[in-house]
Image (spheres, rainbow, N blue to C red):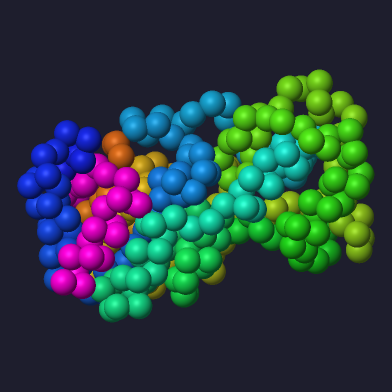
Amino acid sequence: MQIFSFSSLQPDKERRAVEQLAQFLLRHPDVLLLTGAGISTASGIPDYRDADGVRRGNAPVQGPEFRRQEAVRRRYWARSMVGWPLLSRATPNAGHLAIAQLAQQGHVGGLITQNVDGLHQQAGSDDVTELHGSIHGVVCLACHAAYTRRFIQDMLEQNNPQMAGAIATPAPDGDALLEPSQLASFHVPHCPQCGGVLKPDVVFFGDGVTLECAAEAQRKMEEASALLVIGSSVMVYSSFRLCRMAAETGKPLAAINLGKTRADHLLAFKTEAPAQVILPAVVALLNT
């Protein structure tokens, strides 16, 4: 595997890295893009893992525990009430915008994201497969009613005035780090229609991607002639399986990622550069 690291490259080597990516896209105009948290950090959304692929901070909420334990739901919704406003105000960065441009110009094919922030759609990308759902939706586990996250946020703020103005360290995907003492008096939201348990429309850790979504991702991989991973360590199986599928069918893989990925041994090359820096440079080169 060839590795280009922007942090240590001279301008001529940076140019070669951009040229290598541009040539990869020219050879594979139907390339499937797989994006992760690393593409959204420039929009102010923290990621889950460090450069070695190790998860940062406390363990995230587990899906089975969320459904089973009121205390876990209280922890999730309290932290989300404080953290979601930051995520809701996030806007696409140059990396998201460059991907939308590449698609509009016919330089890439499908797009799959592990992110739940909706920034690809805001940037203008169409037909985005959201492997892990969307943080901007909420569903009732009992009657299956669907709500916008904004509507639930209004409920949270109305029922928990003591949390108004709370300040906490932001965490990935609209989470925030709160002291346990702040959870004691928190009122968990329930479905306005049936009183059932409300859950964000995302795939929690410990849960699996829906069969429909997995089939859609597999179809996109089968239709593509190559795979480009952007801003993901592909440590979770739902994304790594796509890398394995590409490798097993002889399709070339490449990555733009700051640090280690689970698929390093499968990659033809990796560029260690911020997506918001290198992707616009690739767009500019392809347009010359």
> Height in image: 61 above or below 286?
above
- Do we see residue 4 in this rendering? yes
Residue 207 image offset from top left, x and y in percent? 59, 48
Where is the N terminus found, in terms of image quarters? top left
Instruction: Indicate whether residue 61 is drawn in magenta.
Output: no
Q: Nearer the viewer, residue 26 or 244?
A: 26
- Residue 231 drawn at (x, y percent): 36, 48
Compared with residue 256, is residue 225 higher up or lower down, i.e. above or below?
below
Locate the C terminus by quadrant. bottom left
In the rendered view, does 267 fall on the left or right side of 68? left
User: In the picture provided, is 128 more to the left or to the right than 233?
Assistant: right
Say which residue appears at 90% left-offset and 39% top-offset: 161
Q: Residue at x 21, y 72 (%)?
A: 287
Q: Nearer the viewer, residue 85 or 47?
A: 85
Residue 67 position, x and y percent, is 75, 44
Task: Please tell me in which quadrant of the rendered image residue 178 appears.
Answer: top right
Residue 216 seen in the figure: no
Depicted 209 relative to depicted 80: above or below: below
Whether residue 284 is in magenta: the answer is yes
- Residue at the spot 21% in from the left edge and 47% down from the top edge: 271
Q: Find the magenta span and give its range.
A: 266-288
